[in-house]
Image: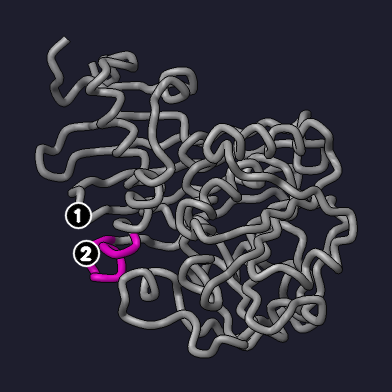
Amino acid sequence: MDRDDTTLRVLSTSDLAGLDITLADVVDTVEQAYRTLAAGLSDNPRKLTVKPADGHSVSYAMLGRDGSRDIVAVKTSYKNGLHDSRERQHYYTTLTIYDDVTGLPVAMMDCSRIGSLRTPAVSALLARECAAPDPRTALVIGTGTQGRLALPFLLTTLPGLERLLLSGTHPDGIAAVRAELARHFPDRELELVTDLRSAAADADIVIATAGGHTPAAVEAEWLKPGAVSILVGHGLAPSTLHRADRVIATSEAQMHVTGTDMADADGTFPAVDLELPAAVSGAATARTSPDQRIFAYNSGLVVTDIALGHRFAQLAAAQHLGTEVALWR
């Protein structure tokens, strides 16, 4: 079928699962999206959120434009069953991309794999920009989707790391973290830790990816001078934010929306010293002293999903994957 303005390439979960992409390619794609945003060439408006009074579900809609790729996209996200265990929840997220030069639709795809790669890539960029010189030890808290790729992405941006620590309690999750590390870096070893306070005191980088029910909560006083703590999910106490020497965020506005559990008793946050796009672009420096304890907040910016989704769409088109749907006929 010839492509025209009535057809749309639909990429399923299985279509995307069959695409090979290196961790370095993911990091480079995400980093370029930040650089383009910092240059003022992209648009990333604040997300729209809908949540019922009883909090059983949450929905997001995010619109953005990538100025280097000349594409526009809409991402939607819907999760139902927030009061239930993870296996009973329903979660759907999609990305629809349009070419802003030709005016034609590019693809509509499941966005779950994109998010599972984008988020740890962002954590790795935060670690690279915020870590003290010559970091040697990294600690990951949590073994869910984000925890499983956190260390491979960290080693992609910081190959000099020597000790790789993991704090987790779910056997299947721990096994999955080990498997992902072995797949990408077969010569590296993982240390499973049970004393979180001691592990945090050793770590130059702490990435907290645990779920909302985790008992783990690293306190500010556990961290050594020069440590950077990166919040993706849960596992850091609010003190790591409020007592930090510097605060870095992918987006200060989004931190105020999605990071409310880290606010103080009055519902306020400390000021963000720098947003990640400015650091990645070289316009400013995340760390200004080796001994600073830095708190970094990782919240998704839709321009990174757009860039990575477009990269997947390119790879899929080259392999003739997906289904052409005459959606507008």
Taking the magenta stretch, the answer to whether it contains residue 36 is yes
Image height of 39 relative to 329, above or below:
below
Q: Residue furthest top?
A: 1
177 vs 321, left or right, is right
179 vs 158, left or right, is right
Amino acid beneath label 2: Leu
Residue under numbered circle 1? 68
Q: Are marks 2 and 1 in contact (CB under 8 Å)?
A: yes
Residue in the picture at 36% in, 75% down: 278
68 vs 18, left or right, is left
Q: Residue 228 sits in which quadrant?
A: bottom right
Q: Secondary structure at mark 2?
A: loop
Residue 307 visible? The answer is yes
> Percent x, y for residue 271?
57, 86
Range shown magenta: 34-42
Residue 325 visible? The answer is no
Between marks 2 and 1, how big is the CA–CA gap? 7 Å
